Image: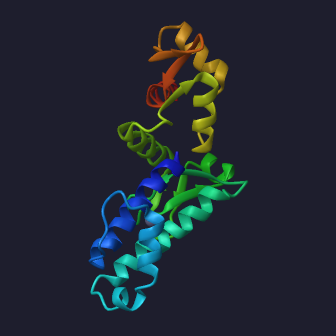
Amino acid sequence: MGAFQLVHDIDEFAGMLGRALNLNYNRHMPSESLLKAASQRIPALASRKDIAHLMHVARRYAHQSVMTLTPPEDRRMVGLCPTCERELWCTDTEIAGQWIVCRCGETLKVTDVQEQHLLTCALAENENTQGTASAVSKLLLANGIKVRRQTIAQWKNRGILVPCGWDSGKPVYRVWAVWKCIVRNS
Ligand SMILES: [Zn+2]
C-alpha cells in the first residue's frame, strides 16, 4: 500500500519545495525536475525559518523510499505511529505480542495501528483497497494481518462478507470489509 502513497507524498513535497524557493514551476513539471532544481539551491533553503521542518520531511521520505524499494524481509509495515508519523515495521513476534513501542516512546496496540492504516488506505481509494480473496490475503499479510484466502471465501458463503464486484469470474472484496470480518471474529 505504501508505494502509491509515497509517490503522491513526494510529489506534494516537491511542490512544497518549489513554492518555498519561488521556483518558476507549474504542476505539470515532474517532481524529479523540481527536486533537482531544489537541490541546486540548498543555501536558499538552508536560510529559511522552516528548514528544520523541510529536513524532517525529506529525511522521512528518504527513509520510506528505501523501506519501500527494499522492504526488510523479516518485518511488516503495520501502519503509522499517530504521534510521530513514523512507519512501524514489526517482526511477526512483535505483532503477535499485540503491543509495540515506537521509537518516539509511544506504546501502541498493534490492531489499532493496523485498523487506522487500513482506514486511511480505504479512504484514499487507491488501487490496493480491494481485490480477489488471494489478493486481499496478500495485501493484509503485508500489514502483518494473517487471514487465509479460504477463510475469506467461507465468510462469503456464510453471507457475512459481500463481494463488491467481480474480476474474471472471481469475487472481489474490499480490504476494509474483510478487516471488519476479522475483527468481528476475534
Ligand atoms: Zn512514534
Q: What is the basis of the colouring in this image?
A: rainbow
Up-down: is 109 above or below 53?
above
Q: Can you tell which quarter of the image residue 17 is in?
A: bottom left
Tell me which image quadrant ligand 1 sits in: bottom left
At which x and y percent is residue 143?
57, 44
Q: Can you tell which quarter of the image residue 74 is in?
A: bottom right
At which x and y percent is residue 65?
56, 62
Residue at image coords 44%, 39%: 126
Up-down: is 147 above or below 78?
above
> Farthest right residue?
73
In depth, the one of 170 and 12 nearer the eye is: 12
Whether residue 105 can be seen here: no
At which x and y percent is residue 58?
45, 73
In depth, the one of 28 and 117 nearer the eye is: 28
Up-down: is 39 above or below 15?
below
Whether residue 95 can be seen here: yes
In depth, the one of 87 and 151 nearer the eye is: 87
Residue at image coords 39%, 92%: 43
At which x and y percent is residue 105?
47, 69
Residue at image coords 38%, 66%: 13
**Image side of residue 54 versus residue 147, left or right:** left
